[in-house]
Amino acid sequence: MKKIKLEILGLSSSQSQTGSFALVLGETEGSRRLPIIIGMFEAQAIAIEIEKIIPNRPMTHDLFKAFANNFHFTVDEIIISDLKEGVFFAKIVCSDGLKKSEVDARPSDAIAIGLRFDSPIYTYENILAEAGIVLTDEVEEDKPEPKTEPKAKVKKEAGRKDDFKNYSIEKLNELLKDAIDKEDYERAAKIRDELSKRN
């Protein structure tokens, strides 16, 4: 069966399920989108890798990578392999250089791990045909394209609005360290973005 390459287009709060997030994948050579609902912790694991934030302590997916590296395994690709009754299934295709193995996984975990290995993400035509959303030109003109570097709302804190424009660079660096220490990666990403604008 022919594989179709996907890329991550966005990560945002789910409109339909409170506490969940929508991970939007898109085919690299087409206009179809594949939205997958994932949990908050998986969204956080994906977001911090996309944002290249280094946590103080390794997360589960980082631990998987360290374990695989120590035993000389690589992750060759991630495949969104099946869709049953609205639930997606995935496979992590691994190799030790001699033998390939497939490990069953949830798509969110598979993608979080795949990002850490810079592995490509694929799916099959039947899955895109069943669950994919086609964006027409009219819709794309009305709605901006999802950002390639999504800012995931991983932690919500009521009543807190972050505006870092008025802080000095020294204060921003202090706030960044504090946010990473507290494992508040959404706040850390915003601070990092503000620092990037000034450099």
Image (cartoon, rainbow, N blue to C red):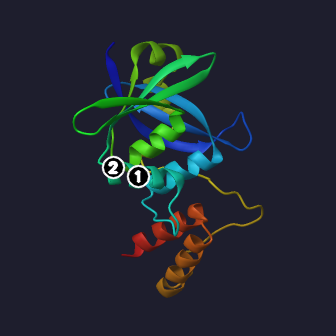
Q: Secondary structure at mark 2?
A: loop
In the image, residue 49 sits, relative to residue 73, either above or below, namely: below
The answer to whether one can see residue 98 in this image is yes
- At horizontal 46% and vertical 66% (from top left) the residue drawn is 193
**Amino acid type assigned to the residue bearing label 1 in the image:** Phe
10 Å neighbourhood of mark 1: few (<14), some, or many (≥20)?
A: few
Query: Gap between marks 1 and 2, in whole Å?
Result: 7 Å
- Which of the 4 quarters of the picture holds residue 157? bottom right
Question: In this picture, is 136 found above or below 143?
Answer: above
Q: Left or right of 168: which side holds 5?
A: left
160 left or right, relative to 63? right
Disc 1 is placed on an element classified as helix
- Residue 122 image position (x, y, % from top left): 37, 28
Q: Residue at x 46, y 31 (%)?
A: 140
Q: Quadrant of residue 101?
A: top left
Tell me if label 1 and label 2 are in contact, CB under 8 Å.
Answer: yes
Q: Which mark is residue 67?
A: 1
Residue extending farthest to the left is 98
Label 2 neighbour load within 10 Å: few <14, some 14-19, many 20+: few
User: In this view of the protein, which residue sits in the foreground, 191 or 60?
Assistant: 60
Q: Tell me the residue at 39%/29% (across/down).
A: 102
Amino acid, disc 2: Phe
Q: Which residue is mark 2?
A: 71
Residue visible at 33% across and 20% down?
3
